[in-house]
Image (cartoon, rainbow, N blue to C red):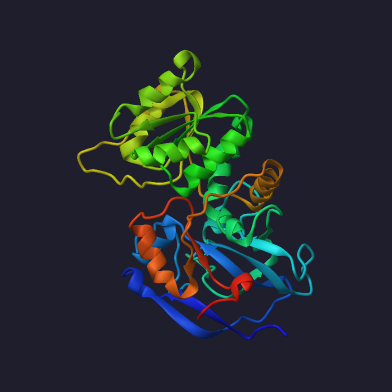
Amino acid sequence: MAPKTTRQWNLTGGEGFDSLKFTEAANIPKLGDHDVLINIHFASLNYRDLIISKGKYHFPTASNVIPASDGSGTVLATGHRVTSLAKGDKVTTLFHQSHQVNPITAADVKTGLGGAIDGTLRQYAVFEEKGLVKMPESLSFKEASTLPCAALTAWNSLYGIESRGLKPGDWVLTQGTGGVSIFALQFAKAAGARVISTTSSDQKAQTLKSLGADHVINYKTDTNWGETAKNLTPGQVGVNHILEVGGPKTMAQSLEAIRPEGVISIIGFLGGMSKKEQPPTFVECLSHMCTVRGVLVGSKQQFEQMNAAIDATGIKPVVHEKVFAFEEVKEAYSYMWEQKHFGKLCIRVDDDSVGGSKL
């Protein structure tokens, strides 16, 4: 018998992590013809989830939303017209529920889980069939819960422009040790590319090398790391792909590192922006003869292509060793905000293998 209620978290405002409120028995929506009911086993957090709770997210959000975009679980029931999924299937959520193929549309942007519509911090959830993706067969529920945002963003950054998609022998520059950067490193190495990574920590530098980075630059001790990266490439021509996460503070260095006709994918602004600093202009993009694109996650079609590659290559997401229980959502948010993690931070929502949620 299908459950009638679910344990869940809601975000009741934008005042920070205390805006997260737990509900013991919320009603589960009635299953429509094209809907799928799933039992969510794991969720994973992204920086986006933290800034939504602080009221600083620049894309659509709804009041009292169920947070988090990323989750994995098991199909419990399907509507009468569902054809691609069946009871027992293992699935992950699609970040933008309506984004089936590229290009992304303005309407797709309004369907972001955990922002505009209810997300994954709940025991049971109803999604439209099109908003779910079958998990890679080689991953656990915990590992698969990390894919919807960070992994797909990295994949889109490397392969989103088909004519300039990543090729063996290409050079890729990643910044820091966030989820997108680590996934990009893994995807690039699996594709036969060379990777230059930046970090501010010698300890993290060793971890990046263990994951396959060919070169690691400490951006605190080498403020001209863009030129250094360019000089590491054959003929000092520059790198083919850069995943830009810092924003205006790092964009100038990214332009120094990129090769002519290279692609810089802007995926975040973690570095913030100083009033004293002027960000690069369009003229500088022209003078470096490169393509600069904004990337907002990716489509269901790309998700399925990425999952096939994960199964074929044996890539395993890097998951932080500490996993939070469902009742520890606030603690998980604080832990991530304080940057105590390395890799993806996961929350055990309702994992049958350990007896289910403690709530």
Quarter assignment of residue 205: top left
Which residue is at the front of the view, 86 or 354? 354
How many dots with numbers?
A: 0
Name the residue: 57% across, 26% down. Answer: 170
285 or 178, which is in the foreground?
A: 178
Q: Position of residue 90 (x, y in %)?
A: 70, 63
Looking at the rendering, in which quadrant would you find the N terminus?
Answer: bottom right
**Residue placed at 68% from the left, 57% from the top?**
135
Asked if residue 108 is positioned above or below residue 241 in the image, the reply reads below
Residue 236 visible: yes
Q: Position of residue 142 (x, y in %)?
A: 58, 60
In the picture provided, is 161 more to the left or to the right than 341?
right
In the foreground, 11 or 223: 223
* Position of residue 313 measured from the top left corner of the image (x, y, whole percent): 67, 41
Residue 59, quarter of the rendered image: bottom left
Q: Residue at x 48, y 25 (%)?
A: 239
Residue found at x 56% / y 40%:
186
Can you name the residue that lies furthest to the top here?
A: 235
Residue 317 position, x and y percent, is: 56, 50
Q: Is residue 228 left or right of residue 65?
A: left
* Whether residue 281 can be seen here: no
